[in-house]
Image: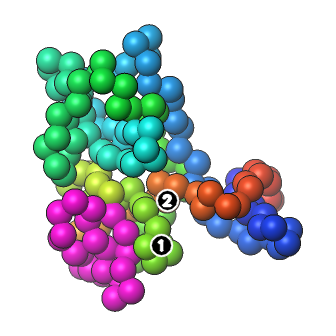
Amino acid sequence: MRSIILDANENRKTVPNWKIPWQNFSANNVPRKDTPIIFLEPSGTYFIGKIDSEGLIKASDSNYIYSKLESQITHFAYIENIRDGLISFPNKPEIDRLIIIKDLHGTPFLGKMNEDSLIERIGTGYRYSIRDGFLISWIYATCPSDLKVSIDRLN
């Protein structure tokens, strides 16, 4: 299965399937504790974190703490459930497009590729080469908002 992206002129362009299994975040649907999760805020901001033993949400890179009751989160997805569209390094993502990355230790983080072909880790300033073997896989966190996506099964 691949995603076919159609622009305003109906030109077709095949891209990796970036589909992420998002779930609504609500009082009736709270994620499991101590598992890596990608969260989406109402502002459209993404972050990776975990729910701790006290039920608070801790952002991985910033150590910011969210209460589940603050309505700061609209959606979430378990990173361990993201399988469709995973791409191995050294295959390159588009420059400046938000991606979810897993490193050699299995730690997920958000980043973007810069013009020097280095992966910049969001919120930390760290930069990684895609050829040093430390970064294992990636998937796009977002799809461009000006494009319509339709799923097309290709044999």
Query: Which span is picked out in magenta?
Result: 111-132
Earlier-in-chain disc, 1 versus 2: 1
Is the residue marked by circle 1 packed among few (<14), some (14-19), or many (20+) residues within 10 Å? many
Asked whether 148 or 37 is in front, the reply is 148
SS for tag 1? Answer: loop
Q: Quadrant of residue 113?
A: bottom left
Scheme of image coloration: rainbow
Magenta segment includes 117: yes
Residue 151 coordinates in the image, percent (x, y): 75, 51
Look at label 2 and name its amino acid: Tyr
Q: What residue is at 79 percent from the left and 59 percent from the top?
A: 154
Mark 2 neighbour density, 10 Å: few (under 14) some (14–19) many (20 or more): many
Q: Which mark is residue 76?
A: none
Q: Is residue 79 visible?
A: no
Q: Residue at x 42, y 61 (%)?
A: 99
Compared to residue 15, the image places residue 52 above or below, namely above
Q: Quadrant of the C terminus?
A: bottom right
- Say which residue label 1 marks: 93
Q: Are marks 1 and 2 in contact (CB under 8 Å)?
A: yes
Residue farthest to the top, as pictured: 28
Three-letter residue code for mark 1 = Pro
Placement of 126 over or under 122, stated as above or below: below
The outermost residue toward the right is: 10
The residue to which callout 2 is attached is: 140
